[in-house]
Image (spheres, rainbow, N blue to C red):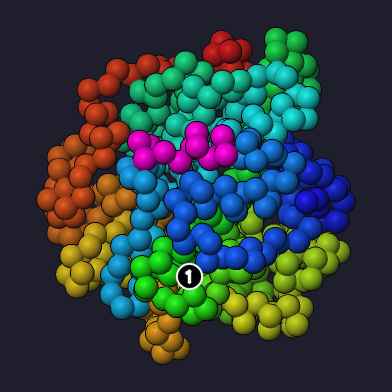
Amino acid sequence: MKYQSTRGGSIVSASQAIVKGLAPDGGLYVPASIPVIDDLMALCNLSYQERAVQVLSRFLTDFTAEEVKKCVQSAYTAEKFGSEAIAPLHKLDDYAQVLELWHGPTCAFKDMALQILPHLLITSMRKNGITEEVTILVATSGDTGKAALEGFKDVTGTRIIVFFPENGVSRMQRLQMVTQEGKNVGVAAVRGNFDDAQNGVKSIFTDDSFNRELKERGYVLSSANSINWGRLVPQIVYYLSAWATMVKNGEITPDEKINVTVPTGNFGNILAAYYAGKMGMPLGKLICASNANDVLTDFIHTGEYNRNRAFHLTMSPSMDILISSNLERFLYDMEGQDAESVSAYMQSLKESGKYQIRQETFVKMQDCLWAGSCDDTETLAVIRDTKDKYGYVVDTHTAVALGVYEKYKKVTGDTSKTVIASTASPYKFGKSVLAALGGNTETDDFSMLQEIKEKSGFAIPVSLWELQNKEERFKTVCAPDEMREAVRKML
Ligand SMILES: *Cc1c(COP(=O)(O)O)cnc(C)c1O
């Protein structure tokens, strides 16, 4: 299977798409067509790992069967994800099934992709004759950095260095990073905000002489960016897997359409659900849920994408985004793979911060998507109501999804079975969750963990609880212009 850029140029293999990340013309790599699984029912009796092999091997066609299997087995173990289910379903009522994507090492859904990406990346590099050690550089505002550290930790042939803004992450997030274990990891705080750290990393990536120096020492830089195809394709697996589990358990009949609701930021997770539909999963509506940063909601209602608006800091920070990069892949498909229109939209976005899609495309989009948003006040109410009604505690991002799903049901009357993507453990955003449930938010982080346990009944994730006893390994604090030197030292 060949991959092409959403802006028209560049035909590459799957492994090349993963190595390159972004296409040279600035577009994103997409497969020439989405493969259909003819015998979906065969997935029902497979394990999560076996389902993942079935899905991934159809996209990663220049990987051998053995290579795909090895990548999957290294990533999705019961040890790392708490059970063989990997991404278990929790039935809320006759309509809604919550797909818990947060049982991985860092308690958030980024693990679903970042646990396997290092293996896909290393396999892809070796396949393309790249023999240097891959050095992943990440600037993080919190969760992605930790998920990347856990994913790359002790993976042979890789190094990972994470920069976080000194005063721009929570105490818990900082502790998670500076106590990181592993022989190939490095972490440094940057004096400044997230943009300073991000710009520092970008300038290192584009510094030719520094890159030459690293190459001579046997290193090549790469990123674990969310637009990499290697992060998207593993996300398709859990939707097909959820469908197969529901069929197997008699919750749905094999040809019964299901809806999927996704709390959306960069549009990666919801795009994976769309692709699962194209692979054959009977899909009704895709329900796109946003917080107060509701640029996608407006886009789906009007056909105009307009990022010229206030940016809100919300209690679902992983969705505080005004430019959803992966939307470009969706548009490409909606436009019948017309790279010219996509390029024109993206050019307009760059120049004026907005674009209007064609009427035909708008109609097509409305047919498969529904959108809504929840602000912070509504989010807190959803957390409280979900606990009262079902005895089930959700995090702030999942609450946005549940709140928008309730609006959807009210407006449309559609009672089809619906999968709700749950993207973080309530422990991960404990303070807001406790505030919603009337708990004490003035105590220390670890007392809060204990209180969430009492309220939710979920076991405290060992990885969070043990932070109080862990040694702080990484003490480097550097200025943005000292980041190169920090990289040199850590390598
Ligand atoms: C990243 C993230 C999201 C947004 O997912 P996208 O794929 O960027 O749309 C939602 N919730 C949580 C907890 C996340 O970490």
Number of marks in picture: 1
State the residue at coordinates (73%, 74%).
357
Image side of residue 346 versus residue 172, left or right? right
Q: Residue 416 at what x, y percent from top left?
A: 43, 82
State the residue at coordinates (44%, 51%).
47
Which secondary structure type mostly characterizes the magenta part of the structure? helix
Residue ID for mark 1: 260
Q: Is residue 341 magenta?
A: no
Q: Residue 305 at what x, y percent from top left?
A: 65, 69
Image side of residue 242 versus residue 139, left or right? left
Measured along the vertical axis of the image, is residue 130 above or below residue 30? Answer: above
Image side of residue 123 versus residue 102, left or right? right
Within 10 Å of disc 1 (Cα), the crowding (few <14, some 14-19, many 20+) is: many
Measured along the vertical axis of the image, is residue 194 above or below residue 87? Answer: above
State the residue at coordinates (59%, 52%).
54
Measured along the vertical axis of the image, is residue 150 above or below residue 187? Answer: below
Indicate the secondary structure of the residue bearing disc 1: strand
Instruction: Note whether residue 369 is visible.
Output: yes
Q: Amino acid at mark 1?
A: Val
Pick whichever, 382 or 39, lies toward us. 39
Query: Based on the displayed image, in which of its 4 quarters is residue 224 positioned?
Result: top right
User: What's drawn in magenta, residue-wise?
Assistant: 69-80
Pick whichever, 318 or 227, lies toward us. 227
Q: Residue 299 at what x, y percent from top left?
A: 61, 73
State the residue at coordinates (35%, 78%).
95
Q: Is residue 73 magenta?
A: yes
Query: Based on the displayed image, in which of its 4 quarters is residue 341 positioned?
Result: bottom right
Quadrant of the snapshot with the C terminus:
top right
